[in-house]
Amino acid sequence: MANRGRATFAKRQKEIARQERAREKAAIRVERKETFVKVDRKGAQEDPDIAGIVPGPQPLPYDLLDEEIAAAEAQTAEKKSQT
């Protein structure tokens, strides 16, 4: 019966450690929220990463030969006629 007290004590110590870690994390979250700098998006210029991108279908990066285009169209027409 002596082991019962020891297991309960270890369990309590583990719970106390868990609560302490949770308190530390909460303090870090509050600190991070206080030091967070809000950026004014309205006054910002256009993002250089997406500058010049046009929504919708994009042009091909290279020109296909007329023969390749005709072959591709023939293949799609053939597939449609088979189904």
Image: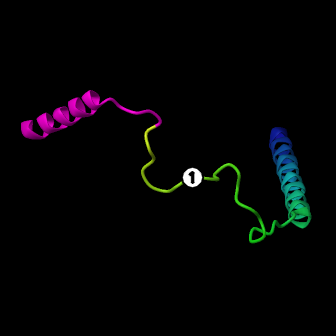
Residue 14 lies, in percent from the top left, at 84, 46
Residue for point 81% across, 65% down: 39
Q: Which residues are magenta?
A: 61-83
Instruction: Count up the numbered dots.
Output: 1
Q: Is residue 24 above or below residue 64?
A: below
Q: Quadrant of the N terminus?
A: top right
Q: Overall secondary structure of the magenta stretch?
A: helix
Residue 6 lies, in percent from the top left, at 86, 41
Front position in the image: 23 or 66: 66
| Circle 1: residue type | Ile
* SS at mark 1 in the image: loop
Q: Is residue 33 left or right of residue 68?
A: right
Residue 78 appears in which quarter of the rendering? top left
23 part of magenta stretch: no
**Which residue, given by chain and number where applicable, does mark 1 sit on?**
53
Q: Quadrant of the C terminus?
A: top left
Q: Is residue 30 left or right of residue 62?
A: right
70 part of magenta stretch: yes
Residue 22 appears in which quarter of the rendering? bottom right
Residue for point 63% across, 52% down: 50
Front position in the image: 6 or 28: 28
Q: Is residue 17 left or right of residue 46?
A: right
Residue for point 71% across, 51% down: 48
Which residue is at the far bottom? Answer: 42
Residue 2 lies, in percent from the top left, at 85, 40
Q: Is residue 62 above or below residue 48?
A: above
- Dot 1: few (<14), some (14–19), or many (≥20) neighbours within 10 Å? few
Q: Is residue 82 left or right of residue 54?
A: left
Residue for point 28% across, 28% down: 68
